[in-house]
Amino acid sequence: MQSLEGVPSAYAGARDGIDVVLRDRGLRRTSPELTAESLLRGAHASAVLEGSASTLGEVREGRGDEIAADAVRLSTEVLGLAPALRTQPLQALARIHALAAGNALPPDRVGRPRDADAATSLRAVADLITARTDAPALGIAAIAHADLATAAPFPSHNGMVARAVERLVLVARGVDEKSLVVPEAAHLALRAEYESNLRGWASASPAGRHSWLLYTAEAYAAAAEASPLRRDAE
């Protein structure tokens, strides 16, 4: 990651943008309500990317469709999994899937990998998340997201899980401890690029991997602009 042209500087710029939004809006003045709003916006955007037709207003009023309900259920508990993600990542990943899937699957398939190859993919993501590394936290979040979304290790809701893990890595690694930026909304706003670059990552080509990392730097900058802190300051 560090040796890929343009990637370290792109992530440094994105991190600076996040830090500016968090600092300039005064973290001491933030509230649980702002975190809840960020999570709600993220849940709506993730649901739409998963196939929901619900509007943000409908989700806010509790009238979203089933996919939106899945995303909201996940969003209400995901931040509580940050400690487990640091120390027991496989259990955290299983719980994230269980929250997303709800009752959509038989109990013996909830939180479980599809097969042996999927279990290997999950272990690789867990190792990535807990690795001691100098790689930027934004890059760890981006790779975890892409690996989960493209390997699809669970029987369902893999995109939703991937986006929740991305947000949680940003929390667990100290980029956005109060979870005030909204990466899901950035991916929705940049949907064509998001989906195209995920396909590039899935190809496993060096160019595809490089493009995904550059794309996510752009998305994280947009995630900061999508924060409810921006609206709160207006």
Image (cartoon, rainbow, N blue to C red):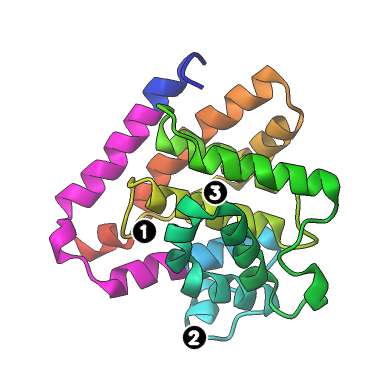
User: Mark 2 or 3 closer to N-term?
Assistant: 2
User: Is residue 213 left or right of 153 when viewed as pictured?
Assistant: left
Q: Examine the structure image and report whether residue 94 is included in the region drawn in magenta.
A: no
Disc 2/disc 3 C-alpha distance (Å)? 23 Å
* Quadrant in which residue 102 is drawn: bottom right
| Amino acid type at image mark 1 | Ser
Above or below: residue 31 compared with residue 142: below
- Image point 56% across, 38% down: which residue? 128
Above or below: residue 118 compared with residue 230: above
- Image point 34% across, 58% down: which residue? 180
Mark 1 touching mark 3, by CB under 8 A? no
For disc 3, the marked residue is: 187
Which x, y percent locates residue 13? 33, 30
Q: Examine the structure image and report whether residue 21 is included in the region drawn in magenta.
A: yes
| Amino acid type at image mark 2 | Glu
Which x, y percent locates residue 24? 16, 49
Disc 1/disc 2 C-alpha distance (Å)? 22 Å
Secondary structure beneath disc 1? Answer: loop
Which x, y percent locates residue 135? 43, 28
Mark 1 touching mark 2, by CB under 8 A? no
The numbered disc on residue 179 is 1
- Give the mark toward the camera: 1 or 3: 1
Q: Which residues are magenta?
A: 11-40
User: Is residue 117 left or right of 44 when viewed as pictured?
Assistant: right
